[in-house]
Image (spheres, rainbow, N blue to C red):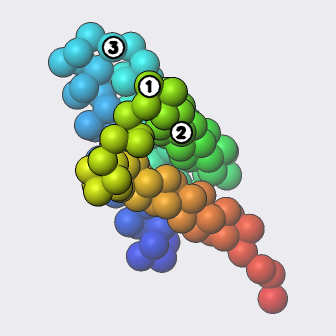
Amino acid sequence: MASWVVQLIILLLAGYGGYAIAEGVNDRQLIWGLFGIAALAGAWGLLRNGRWSQYVIYVIAAMLTMSWVVVVWQLMGEGWVTDHVTAVVFALAPGALTVVVCVAVSLAVFKHFHAAKN
C-alpha cells in the first residue's frame, strides 16, 4: 500500500489531468489535452508503482514551473511587475505556490522510488 503522500500525489495528478483535458476540449487546445493525458498516465503509473511514471511526473512538474517562469519573465519585460507591489505579490502567489508544490511532488516521488534500503 502506498503512503498517504503518494496517494495524495496520485489524487493531485488525476485531478490536474482531468482539469487539463476539460480545458483542452473547451478551448480546443491540443497542448492542454496532452498535458492532461500525461498527468493521468503519471497518476496511473504511480498507482501501479511503475518506475517509468516518475519521469512523466518530473516532466510535468518541470514544464509547469518553466511556463510560470516564462510568464513572469514576459510580465517583467512589459513593466507589469513594478506597478503595485501588493497587487503583484497577490497575483504571483498562486503561481509561486504551484512551483513549491511541483518541487515537493518531485522530491516525494524521488523518495518513493529511491527509498533507502536497510
From the viewer's perspective, is residue 115 above or below residue 113? below
Where residue 51 sits: x, y (%)? Answer: 67, 52
N-terminal of the pair, mark 1 or mark 3, is 3
Residue 57 percent coordinates (x, y): 56, 46
Front-most of 13 and 61? 61
Residue 110 placement, left or right of 48: right
- Kindly identify the amino acid type of the residue bearing the numbered disc 3: Gln
Q: Secondary structure at mark 3?
A: loop
**Element under label 1?**
loop
Q: Hey, which residue is sitting farthest bottom in the picture?
A: 118
The disc placed on residue 69 is: 2
Q: Residues within 10 Å of mark 3 (few under 14, many from 20)?
A: some
Determine the residue positioned at 45% across, 48% down: 43
Q: Percent position (x, y) of residue 107? A: 62, 65
Residue 63: which quarter of the image?
top right
Give how far across and how far down residue 70 sits, in percent.
Answer: 53, 31
Q: Does residue 52 sit above or below 112 in this rendering?
A: above
Label 1 Cα crowd, 10 Å radius (few <14 / some 14-19 / many 20+): few
Which residue lies under the disc numbered 1?
A: 78
In this view, the residue in front, 41 or 75, is: 75
Evaluate whether residue 56 shows in this view. Answer: no
**In the rendered image, which residue does mark 3 sit on?**
29
Give the residue displayed 26% in from the left and 11% down from the top. 28
Q: Nearer the viewer, mark 2 or mark 3?
A: 2
Q: Is residue 36 in view?
A: yes
Residue lying at 41% horizontally and 76% vertically, measured from the top left? 4
Residue at point 81%, 88% (across, down): 118
Q: Nearer the viewer, residue 107 or 77?
A: 77
- Furthest residue in direction front, as rendered: 83
Q: For the residues marked 2 and 3, what is the alpha-carbon distance in whole angstroms? A: 21 Å
C-alpha span from label 2 to label 1: 14 Å
